[in-house]
Amino acid sequence: MEEGEKTGSIHPITTFIDQAHTIFREIGFSVADGPQLESEFNNFDALNVPADHPARDIQDTFWVKNPKDGKDLLRTQTSGVQIRYMMNNKPPFRIISPGLVYRQEATDATHEAQFHQIEGLVVEEGANLANLRGTLEYFLKKIFNDDNLITRFRPGYFPFVEPGVEIDISCSFCKSDSCRVCKGTGWIEILGAGMVHPNVFRAVGVDSEKWKGFAFGLSPERILMLKHGIHDIRLFHSGDMRFISQF
Ligand SMILES: [Zn+2]
């Protein structure tokens, strides 16, 4: 190596997604991919978010003109991958879909116009909330390297699931006592999930009487910020070598 040259390192988000692949593969998931430029149907309509539904305003969208109906968009979630997968494959299946998503919002230390998601979808006969809990606890224990981690479910609203849940984990940093990360509560809000809404199955032609499903979505950036005490999400895409070379 020439003097002055520096070796690079793998970006922490790439490392995280690789780890997530490994953990989910251990329990029977495969990885599905899809385009970042998505149709309105795959990103919203098929996910039980009709055009006049207020839920559509939760996600400020970058619209992109297309020659046909002018209605493409930069995906606001990776759920479109699940829609594509369900339209082209017969259940049962377990998939995760990692990738970049885009929201048109002001950036600050905790918000960026682009960030990553890893979404998961299981469609099987008899899939239920207990399976969802077992799956996510398996993943979260491994990714936080904490065998004693427990989850807490709270009701949450996401249009594509019913019931929907927000999932907290016991704080690995203070062992549920009190610290800055959990703001003294002993719990950390970590991801959203729920049972697939029958309207979603209807949109993609899956028989919701026969098949049950659960879905979840998490943010690599959020989990990495928690794990490493990173205070500004913008550092991930800053290209700042002083930040990246720490990993
Ligand atoms: Zn804590």
Image (spheres, rainbow, N blue to C red):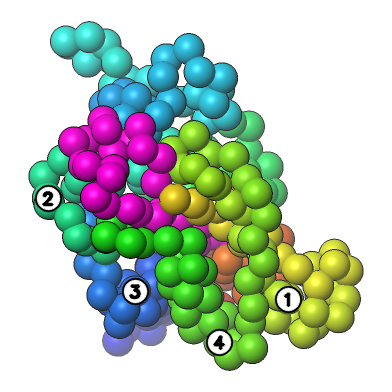
Which of the labelled discs sits on residue 89, or is there none? 2
Q: Disc 4 designates what residue? A: 145
Q: Earlier in the sequence, mark 2 or mark 4?
A: 2
Please determine whether, in this image, residue 216 is positioned above or below residue 177: above
Residue 139, given in percent of the width and then of the height, sits at 46, 76
Say which label, 4 or 3, has the lower sequence index.
3
| Cβ atoms at labels 2 and 4 below 8 Å apart | no
Disc 3: which residue:
24
Q: Earlier in the sequence, mark 1 or mark 3?
A: 3
**First-in-chain label (4 vs 1):** 4
**From the Cβ of disc 3, is ligand 1 less than 8 Å away?**
no
Say which residue appears at 26% left-offset and 11% top-offset: 70
Mark 1 beta carbon near ligand 1 (under 8 Å): yes
Q: Where residue 211 appears, x then y in whole percent? A: 26, 52
What percent of the width, then of the height, locates residue 238? 52, 53
Q: What is the distance, in whole Å, between disc 4 and disc 1 at their CAs? A: 12 Å
Q: Amino acid at mark 2?
A: Asn
Amino acid carrying label 1: it is: Cys
Residue at image coords 54%, 82%: 141
Instruction: Answer with left or right where residue 100 lies relative to residue 80.
Output: right
Q: CA distance from mark 2 to mark 4?
A: 34 Å
The residues bearing labels 2 and 3 have C-alpha atoms spaced at a distance of 19 Å
